[in-house]
Amino acid sequence: MRVFKSLVLLFLVPVVRGSRVQLKNGGYEDIVIAINPELPEDHNIIRNIQDMVKEASTYLFNATKQRFFFKAVKIIIPLHWPPKPEYLSVKTESYDKADVIVANPFLKYGDDPYTLQYGGCGEKGRYIHFTPNFLLNDTLHNIYGSRAKVFVHEWAHLRWGVFDEYNYDAPFYLSVNSGKKTVEATSCSTDITGKYIVQSCTGNSCTTRECEYDQQTKLYEAGCKFVPEKPQNVPASIMYMQSLSSVVEFCDQSTHNEKATNMQNKMCNYKSTWEVIMNSTDFSNTSAINSSSPPFETSFSLLQTKDRVVCLVLDVSGSMIVYNRINRLYQAAEIFLLQIIEMDSWVGIVTFHSTAQITCNLKQIVTENVRHDLTKCLPTSAGGGTNICAGVYKGFEVIKQKYSNLDGSEIVLLTDGEDRGMNICLTEVKNSGSIIHTIALGPNAVRELEQFSDMTGGLKFYATDTVDSNGLIDTFSGISSGSGNISERSIQLESTAQSVAVKQWMNGTVTVDSTVGKDTFFVVTWDRSTSPPDILLRDPKEKEYRTSNFTVSDLNLQTARLKIAGTAEVGGWLHWIQNNHTESQVISMIVTSRPASLAVPPVTVKAHMNKDTNNFSNPMVIYAEVSQGFLPVLGATVMATVEQETGSAVELRLLDDGSGADIMKNDGIYSKYFTSFKGNGRYNLKVHIQGRNQTVRLGHRQSRALYVPGYIENGDIKMNAPRPEVSDDEIQAKLGSFNRVASGGSFVVKNVPSGGTTDVFPPCKIVDLEAQYEEDKIHLSWTAPGNDLDEGQAERYIIKMSESLLDLRNTFENATSVNTSSLVPNPAGTKESFQFRPENFTIENDTIIYFAIRAVDNASLTSEVSSIAQVALFVTSKECSPAGASNDDAINEDINVLTIVLIVAGCVAALLIAVSITVCILHKKNRRGFDEIRM
């Protein structure tokens, strides 16, 4: 199944595991660029990748003032491409840990290069995505610029956590300079010249015209685009319009446009991209190189993937007897072998205590019978000491039965005990070429265990002895292939457990959606009796499965398994499970499935923390990425459970609303701060995702290279083809209801005070403040922060206003205060609204006022200054001038004003003359009458 067959469409899981790029003397090494296994062989892709990176190295070197360059790159070649002598074997590199992936887009919505960014300003991204068409189609150069420039643009996203300086959603903003209103393109720098154009197309015929103003927004009409002059003298900025030939720099403090309504200003507190780069650890750990060009040309290694080889190395020491660990290990490993590990994989099994034993040599999973044969090698008894290195060495021995070296192989290492001799094999493990995934079971597992994973790029898991958390089963379910091919990957739909009293029931519904259904398993486990509970499972068409339909293995008397023939029915599967034992016991339901069709990618979930190790009192962030193919899935309900060593668990709802820990709204990345640190040690993460009877909308990725609409050359407007847009019908995923469960691995917390913690977390920064001016009132809206970051409820708000954006940012306390005595904060996540008439503040026509807010909690801890909102106070009806308007326009405006003044003055003079004449005539008549009377 791993062999490429008839160009079968294989869908891919996005990258989620950390980069292993190294920076040495200014040169980036071990950059991994992985070609998607879906793609047919095309050596032009490899050649163009090499040309792109070589050129980008020089461009990056100059853009960073002779500081950084690309030194060594590894390109991963798909398994189905025919082998070549120059292809080496992958070691610890894999598709899902790649820094750059080359893959087709989902729904063909375009070739925009983008970087997936989870974190805030200065935090590394997850991966860069290039389409093969972007790498092969030279006509796209006119839209995005050279591939080398685009790569540097995206590298800045990925490595330094900067953001785009344009904004598709807010392409223009109002500005007042020297008392004159202007409309400017959201850009950096403001010195880039061009025109504002609307393009209309009917079939293949397109026309252009100048943009008109929207009387309501005072900005340009919808559909207006800024079209730059192709020849420019402006060197910045790479994060705005890298396609311009003159652009060779990042915006710095002198050229930065802090007024632009872009993500760079919003996320990085109005700092320039170069300031953020200078603040990075990369910058502080290097010095400028005294050379006009990079000291080394980029070198490339071509690495080809191979069949998956996994050896389970399992602890069977005496401590595995307690808490029923050995039986729980069997249950979890059995699920891994029968339901999780992919077909055509090679699997071996080793057990260890004081010494190590091979219980199963490598077997290739080509039939279901091989899977069952492997389960017979799992341990059922325990005893003796703990010698981890002996187990690892024996695992290496098993792998070398097939390969002459360990490159690209995997070891799943589980232990629950201490081992002071573990350090003796660390160096050999580091240099082995094998990836080691570690599972720490219980609170006493050796503290250095995770070093194996850190050195080899493996996954890290932790399972407590709390039976009703399904921790060990979820851990094994999370160890899937890193090849990027999910056409045969097992997807966990459900994992739930609870303590059930005698004769009581555990009921529930598991949804099988249309993207899965192949190889669907329903597994019921229990922890006390040796006979199964009473099980009733009913599919969406009312077909019933009872206990007798489930299979119980002679070697595992506490697990019942049902495999659904063919493709499982789409809809809700109802289950009722009754505890017929003589005492309470924990019963669990685990459901796994595989993609139903090669033509439709399944909904997938990847969960993780923002770091593996944390020192109190730094907060952590939980992330869950929900996607279908490469498009985000919006509108899901995502619940995270964090469990610590004591077994106590905290449940949090993750949000994708662009507030709190979530940096971007509607990007399919659901986020939440985690601050419930109850002690030192290991914690684990698990997420449950539900989409319930709704049409789930698919969104686009952010942090993309700008699609330039066209250029002006010698006065002629030359438009590019309009940017491909996907219709609403195409991005509405009619998934109905769906369920997913995913393990987010483990993390370690240190320096938590033994006597308990005090309130050390202020409310989180408000990042979505908006302002409007209506009927002489200011209307502000934002999402409420919490008492502790984005959890709980703040005590009060402080709102300030100023005519200077930078003064408000830098000296918030000195700005004019807004009376907030009537404003009471709502719970975190609530949409807040507040309106007021400005007091103690002189408002004049043609003025822009800036607003910012801070939240204060009940311990008087104060949040950072919020994002800054603005309102433009334009009372007169005259039109705004576009940025860069010609002097003739200004002269004509002055002439028009002068004409109006002269006309008004003339009218007043004529009126005065008429009045004077009338008075004179009346005066003469009155005088004549007076003389007649006197005579």
Image (cartoon, rainbow, N blue to C red):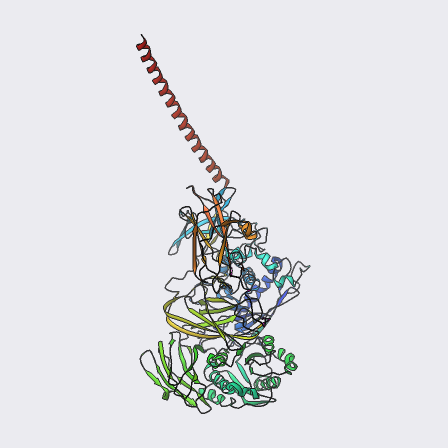
Whether the magenta-drawn stretch holds residue 476 is answered as no
Position of 175 with respect to 551 (left or right) is right
The quarter of the displayed image where residue 415 is located:
bottom right
Q: Position of residue 275 (x, y in %)?
A: 59, 56
Q: Residue furthest bottom?
A: 554
- Per the rendered image, the range of residues in magenta is 750-766
Task: Quarter of the image for the C terminus: give it.
Answer: top left
Quadrant assignment, res 121: bottom right
Residue 23 image point, x, y percent: 63, 67
Secondary structure mostly seen in the magenta stretch: loop
Which x, y percent locates residue 822? Answer: 44, 53
Foreground: 359 or 650?
A: 650
Where 47 falls versus 192 (above or below)?
A: below
61 or 390, which lies in front? 390
Q: Viewed as shown, does residue 528 lie left or right of 159? A: left
In-front residue for pair 375/296: 375
Location of residue 542 with respect to 857 vertically, above or below: below
Can you say whether 130 is above or below 401 in the image? above
